[in-house]
Amino acid sequence: MTRKAMGLSGLALVLGLMGYLVLAAAPEGVSLAEPTTAPAAPAAVRGVAAFSGSGFGGISQTALETNAVPFKLVAAALTLEEQAQDPAAPPDLATLRRVMQRFGFLYPERIDGLAEGMRLPLSAKPLGMTHGFIAPVGGARVEVANLGCAACHAGVAYAPDGTPLPNRAVLGMPNTSLDLEKYTQAIFIALRRHAGDPALLAMADTLFPDMGWQERASLRWIVLPLARKRLEELAGAARALPFSNGLPGATNGVAALKLQAGTPLLGGGMADRGFVSIPELALRHRRSRLLADGAYATPSGKADARELAAITSFFTVPSMGVKPEEAQRHIPEAVEIFAWLANYRPQPFPGPVDMAEAERGGALYARDCASCHGAFDWNAGAPQLADYPDWIGDVGTDTLRARAVDRALAKAIRNSAYGKVIKVMPGDGYAAPPLAGVWASAPYLHNGSVPSLAALLDPRLRPRRFMVGGHALDWTSMGLRLTAEGHYPTGYRPFAVPQWVDTTLPGLGNGGHAYGSDLSTRERQALIAFLKLL
C-alpha cells in the first residue's frame, strides 16, 4: 500500500471514529428519579410523578454548563471538604447526606402526596434532585444531577407542637430551609480546593464502588479537565455566581434568568437581590399571573391551567439551565402537574385551634382580607376558596424584587421561544396570593422578611434580624419559634444550618403591608386562628 493510500485509509479511520463519537453521543439523559407510571395512568398521577422527579431537559450537556453538576465528582469533593473540616468523618454516603442536609435538602422516609403505591428511591441523593446519565461523546458515561420541582416545593411536616419532622415531607409545601446560596458556594469551594488532588477521583471510587470503567474514565478525561478549566476562569473570584442565590427558603430566580438570558444584572450582580420566598403551591392554579410580582401573565388573561402550565415550564430556564426551546418540549409534563395541583391541598394545621376564636377570625378575614386574598366558604371542614380576585398592587413592601424584572429582561423573554406563551407584565407591584397553607409558610412577605403572622399583622413586632432554616414553628405567633433577639430557643437543634435575615439589607426590607395594625390583640389572635385552617 502506498503512503498516500495509507494516509487516506488513516484519515478515513479517524473520520469514521469521529463520526461514531458524534453519532453515539447522548447529550441528554432521562431522569432516574421519576417514579414510573402506567401509560394509562390518570394525568394527575403522571403529574405528581413528574413533579417528584422529572428531568425537564435538565439532565443534559447544556445544563451541565450552568446549573447541573457531575454528581459523583461533586459528591467526592463535598466529602473531602467535610473530612478537611472533620478528620473523623468517614468516607461514605452517610457523610455526604449530613453535608446535604445542612443545606436544607430532605431525605424523608415518608412522602405525603404521592399517588397510591408510588415510591421514590432516595439513597445518595435527596428529594427533588433529578439525575441520569449522558454521553458527551460516544462511549462516555457521566451521571448528571439537577434540582427539580420537589427540591424547593416539598417541605417538612410538623408535629402537633410545631416541631419539624424532616423524615416526613409533603409535596407542594415550601422547603423553607433550602439554602441554594450555601449549596452552590460549598460546591465551588470544594472543587476549587480538591480538583487538582488525586484523592478526588479516589474518593469517587470509594463512595460509588459500583462505578464502571466508562464513567471513571469519563470523569478523569472529560469532566475533570472541564471543571479545572472553569475554575481557572474563576481564579481569584470569591464566588461562583455574580449574584447572591438567596437565603434558606428564598431564591433569586430573576437574577438566575438574567444570567441565562445574557441581560445586565443590577450593580453587576451583587445588587440584584430580588429574593423571593418559596411559595406554598395550593390554589396557585387560580391565578392568571405568576411570580411574586405577577410579571408572567397568561395570554388570555384568565386562570387557564394549560396556559399556566406552559408558563411554568419556563421556570426550568433559570432554575435548571434548560434552553427555552428545550423547555417547551416539556409543556405536556407541566400540564399534567397542573392536573395534580388542581386537587392538591397542604398538610392540615397539626396543632390545636380554638374554633370559636377561628369563627370570629373568619368574619374579620371576610371584612379585611378577602378583597385581595380571596373569599372562603366555611360550612364544614376546611374553608374552601370561593372567589379569588387575582389582585396585584403596591402595599408598601420592599420594591427591589418588583424592579428586578427590567425592560431588558422583559424584552429578552418576549424575543425568546416563549414570546407568545408568556405575556410579560412587570411593574404592577406584588400579587396577593391565596393563603392556603399559610401557617407553614413562614417567614412572610414576598421576601421572607417577617418571621410570623403576629408580626405581619402588627408591624411593631417585626424584628430587625432573625434566624431562619431548620426551624420549629410557634403556634401562638404563628411563625418561626424565636427568642426576642431572633435566635432559636436554647437547646433547640435545627435540622439545617440557619442563616440570619437582616432586614436592613437591600431586598430584605420588612416594611409595608400594615393591614392588621388597627386591630386589637384579641382580633389579631382570632384572625390567626382562622388562617391556621386554610
Image (cartoon, grey):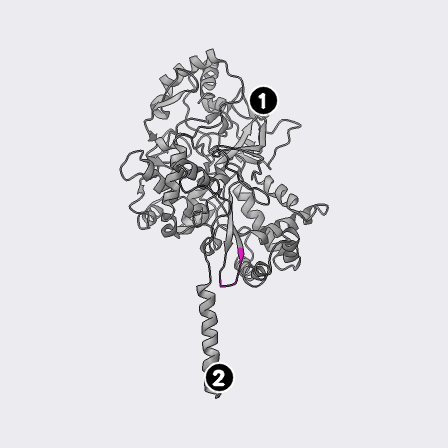
Residue placed under numbered mark 1 in the picture: 161
In the rendered image, is residue 220 in sight? yes
Mark 1 and mark 2: span between their CA atoms?
A: 80 Å
**Residue 139 magenta:** yes
Are the residues at dot 1 and dot 2 in contact (C-beta closer than 8 Å)? no
Question: Can residue 266 be seen by looking at this rendering?
Answer: no
Q: Would you place residue 202 above or below residue 318 in this image?
A: below
**Dot 1 lies on which element?**
loop
Q: Is residue 312 left or right of residue 133?
A: left
The label nearer to you, 1 versus 2, is: 2
Q: Which residues are magenta?
A: 137-142
| Residue 289 position (above or below residue 185) | above
Instruction: Identify which amino acid the numbered label 2 is placed on.
Output: Met
The local secondary structure at tag 2 comes to: helix
Where is residue 189 drawn, in percent x and y?
Answer: 59, 51
Q: Quadrant of the C terminus?
A: top left
Q: Quadrant of residue 283?
A: top left
Among all residues in the image, which is located at the extreme bottom? 2
